[in-house]
Amino acid sequence: MNLNELLCLLMFAAVMATMMAGFPVAFTLSGVGIGFALLGSALEVFEWRTMGGVMGRLYGIMSNEMLVAIPLFVFMGFMLEKSKTAERLLETTSRLFGTLSGGLAFTVVAVGTLLSAATGMVAATVATLALISIPAM
């Protein structure tokens, strides 16, 4: 096993250990990444000048207009849940399917279909459905 493979396994173990310790994912990934970049630079298996391109990549990702919509869709799902609109939709649809066997499953699928058409994103729909349908289940 060469040094690169050993550092790769150590990095994976460090990420798992810090996440299991309860650190937030963003801080875990960035902290472990920078720490192992420093370690790799000290062991001369990583060139530190490679880190110079990181800011350009981050700016390119943040300026992508397509990715701006993602937090807005999640916010829309959150607002549907907080305004009780999605919950009222679930209750109304459950009256329609309540008499059938497995009516709650039909209700969640129907509400999921309607919410995904309204929000336009799967993550927002899943978050909203999880918040409103788990108590009913």
Image (cartoon, rainbow, N blue to C red):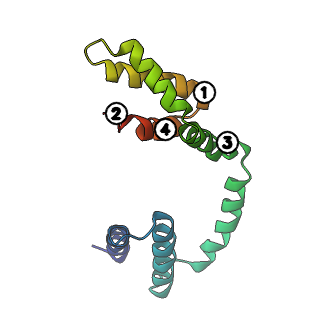
Taking the image as shown, residue 39 lies to the left or right of residue 20, namely right
Mark 3: few/some/many CA within 10 Å (<14, 14-19, 20+): few
> Please, what secondary structure does the residue beneath circle 2 have?
loop
Which of the two labelled residues, at mark 1 and mark 4, occupies the earlier sequence position?
Answer: 1
Which-is-in-front pick, marks 4 and 2?
A: 2
Tell me the distance, in whole angstroms, between the alpha carbons under discs 3 and 4: 17 Å
**Amino acid beneath label 1:** Ala
**75 and 10: which is toward the camera:** 75
Which of the two labelled residues, at mark 3 and mark 1, occupies the earlier sequence position?
Answer: 3
Tell me the distance, in whole angstroms, between the alpha carbons under discs 2 and 3: 30 Å
**Amino acid beneath label 3:** Ala
**64 and 49: which is toward the camera:** 64
Q: Quadrant of the C terminus?
A: top left
Name which quarter of the figure residue 98 lies in.
Answer: top left
Q: Which residue is mark 4?
A: 128
Name which quarter of the figure residue 105 lies in.
Answer: top left
Mark 1: few/some/many CA within 10 Å (<14, 14-19, 20+): some
Can you tell which mark lies on residue 69? 3
Which of the two labelled residues, at mark 3 and mark 4, occupies the earlier sequence position?
Answer: 3
Q: Which residue is mark 1?
A: 118
Which-is-in-front pick, marks 3 and 4?
A: 4
> What residue sits 67% from the left and 54% below the top?
61
> Please, what secondary structure does the residue beneath circle 4 have?
helix
Q: Looking at the image, which residue sits at the far bottom?
A: 42
Q: Which residue is mark 2?
A: 136
> Please, what secondary structure does the residue beneath circle 3 have?
helix
